[in-house]
Amino acid sequence: MKMTPEKAIDRILEKAPQTLKHFKHHDSVLFAFGEHESATVVIKYRDTNSKYSAMLTAGKKLAFLKPYCIAFVSEAWISKTFPPEGKNVSDMSDKQEALQAIAQNLEGEIKAAAIPFSRVGKDILFGEPIESSEAESYLLELFWRGVRESSH
């Protein structure tokens, strides 16, 4: 059965909230679905630049799988307003933590979902999931660029 962005998001949303609730954090995880094999990679980074570099490198290293669909899940900040020039979502006063998942296939079809959550004492309380087919992801674009660069 071929993985689609929608199926990838559904699968992630089945397990990721329980992982976050149990471990009190969720690693940044990349899923690459290839023609014959798939791979799951925990992406470690210190800052934005190292995160970008890690995704580009992951694309280069996983190009041999001939990926046709990828998905990424991590904790993130979300906001209902766009940050002004020079600011990040993490700088916004209405920021909220979320478990965020995004998936994209080779044809560019994309699906994204975010589940807002709050840390209350030792518990994690989830809000309602927010889903969209109108999303962009610089991280996923970097992965695909790494795939293209390694296949030349």
Image (cartoon, helix red, strand yellow):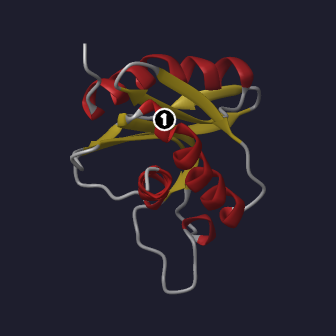
Image location (x, y in percent) of residue 30: 54, 36
Q: Residue at x 73, y 61 (%)?
A: 47
**Which image quarter holds the N terminus?**
top left
Residue 131 lies in quadrant? top left
Residue 19 lies in quadrant? top right
**Which image quarter holds the C terminus?**
bottom left
Whether residue 97 is visible to the viewer of this picture, yes or no, is no
Image location (x, y in percent) of residue 71: 43, 36
Image location (x, y in percent) of residue 18: 57, 17
Tell which of 12 and 38 is nearer to you: 38
Tell which of 23 and 34 is nearer to you: 34
Q: Residue at x 48, y 76 (%)?
A: 83
Type of amino acid at the residue the image marks with label 1: Phe
Question: Badge 1 local density, few (<14 within 10 Å), some, or many (20+)?
Answer: some
Q: Secondary structure at mark 1?
A: helix
Disc 1: which residue: 64
Q: How many numbered badges does the structure rendering display?
A: 1
* Residue 16 horizontal side relative to residue 151, left or right: right
Q: Residue at x 43, y 17 (%)?
A: 14
Residue 106 lies in quadrant? top left
Identify the residue at the far top of this view: 1
Q: Residue at x 38, y 34 (%)?
A: 128
Whether residue 27 is visible to the viewer of this picture, yes or no, is yes
Tell which of 75 and 129 is nearer to you: 75
* Residue 7 horizontal side relative to residue 113, left or right: left
Image location (x, y in percent) of residue 147: 45, 49
Identify the residue at the far front of this view: 152
* Residue 44 horizontal side relative to residue 114, left or right: right
